[in-house]
Image: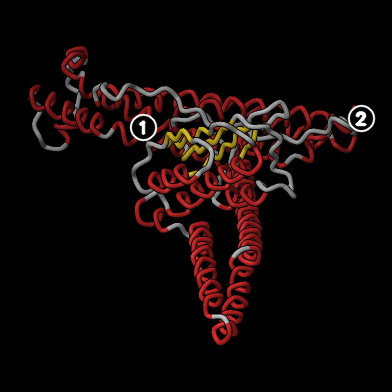
Amino acid sequence: MPNVKDMTTYASPAPTQAPAARLLRRIGIDTQYVLLGFPLGLVTLVVCMTGFFTGLGLVVIWVGLPLLVGTLMVSRGFATIERARIGPVFGYRIPHPAYKKNPGGDLLRRTFTPFTDGQSWLDMLHGMFRFIPSTIGFSFVITWWIAAISGLTVPLWDWAIPDGPDRHDLPELLGMGDATSTRLIFYFAIGVFFAGTLYPVVRGAALMEAWFARGLLCGVNELREQVNQANAARDVAQQQKAAAVSAEATALRRLERDIHDGPQQRLVRLAMDLGRAEQQFATDPDAARATVAEALAQTRETLDELRALSRGIAPPILVDRGLQAALTALAGRCTVPVDLDAPVTERLDPLVESTAYFVVAEALTNVAKHSHASEVQVTVKRNQAGLLVSVSDDGVGGASLAKGHGLAGLADRVQAAGGLLDVTSPATGGTQLTAALPL
C-alpha cells in the first residue's frame, strides 16, 4: 500500500450529490484519461524508442551517451505527467519517487547519474510499452462510446441513410424483417446494452492502464516506503520494549529501596521489641506491656507503609473504579492542594489507565517532596489522538527527564505504552509535565 502521509485526496463530489452525477463524473474522468493516454502513448513510444536505440547505436563514438541521458530525462518528464494523470483515476495524488542525485560530484558525474538510477530506466520502459494498454483501453472505450451514442440516437439519424435496393441492415440479415420500426428498436436495444455496460468497461480500461503505469512508475518507490515504514515500526517496537524493561527495572529498584528503608526496618525493630518484651515479662511486666504497645504501633505503621507500596504497584481503586476515581483519591492524599480536571469517566485500556495514573502519582510525589508549590493543576483530556495528561505546579522548577533524575523512569514507562512525555520546568519557577498516550 502507498504511504498515506504522502497522498492528497482529490476533491470528490459531496455525499449529498446524486449517485447518477457521481457515476457520470467517474465515467468522464476515466474516459478522458484513456482517450488522452492513446496519443501520449504514441508520442512516448516514438521518443523513447528512437532516443534509446539511436543512442545505443552511437555509444561506440560517445555521442550516444548524452543522447541516452537526454532520453532518460525526457522519459522522466513523461512519467511525471503520467503520475499526475493517474491520480484522479485512483482518487488520490500519487507521490513522486526520489530520484538519485549526485550533488557532491563534478559536472560529468552529475550528468551521467541517471544511468545509475533504476527508477529512470523504469520510466523509459514505461514510455516504450505504455502504448500496449493504452491502445487496448482506447479501442474498448471508443467502441463502447460510439456504439452507445449511435444506438441511443438512432431515431435522430436513421432517416439520413438512403433506403436503396442495395441496403441490407443487420436485422434483415438476421431474419428479423426490414420494417423501419423493427430496425429502430433493434439498434436502440444495442445502444441501451452498450450504455448499460459503459461504466464497467470504461472503468476497467482506465484501471488497466493506470495500474500498468503505477507498477512501473511508483511500484519501487511504494515498496521502498513499505520497507521504511516496517523498519520504523520495528525501531519503535524495540524502543518501547527497551523502555518497558528499563521502567520495570526502575520500578523494582524503587520498590526494593522502599521496602528496605521502610517496612523491613520496622519489622527488624518489631522483632527486637518483641524479644525484649519476652525477657521483660519475667522481671518487669509493666515495661513488657509498654514494649508490646510500642510494637503494636510499629505494626500499624508497617501495615500503612505496605498499603502505600501496594497502591504504587497496582492500586485497587484503579482496577475497580477506573481512572477518574483513582486520580480523585490521589489528589485527596496529596499534601499540596490539587485542582483536578478529569472528565474521563469511561474505562480505557488497562495499560493506558495504569500509565496515566502513575504519571500523575509520580508528578504529585515530586511536587510534594521537591517543588515547594502552593497549588497543583491536574488535567486529563481525551481527544482523537489519545489521552492527554498534564500536571502543572507553581513551584521552584528545575525538573528534568535526563538520566539520574526522578522522572527518567517515568519517561520510560510512558514510552513503553507508546506515548510521549514532555517536561517544561524553567529555573525561574513552575513545572508542567505533559504525557500523550495513544488509545
Q: Which residue is mark 1?
A: 202
The amino acid type found where label 1 is placed reads Val
Where residue 231 sits in the image (x, y, percent)?
A: 64, 51
Q: Is residue 137 above or below residue 239?
A: above
At x 32% / y 25%, what residue is drawn?
145
Snapshot quadrant of residue 247:
bottom right
At x 35% / y 52%, what residue is drawn?
321
Does residue 32 appear left or right of residue 367 in this picture? left
Q: Is residue 113 above or below residue 330?
A: above
How many discs mark residues in the rendered view? 2
Secondary structure beneath label 1: helix
Secondary structure beneath label 2: loop
- Check disc 1: other Cα within 10 Å, few if <14, some if 14-19, many if 20+: many
Q: Which residue is mark 2?
A: 106
Name the residue nearer the viewer: 314 or 348.
314
- Check disc 2: other Cα within 10 Å, few if <14, some if 14-19, many if 20+: few
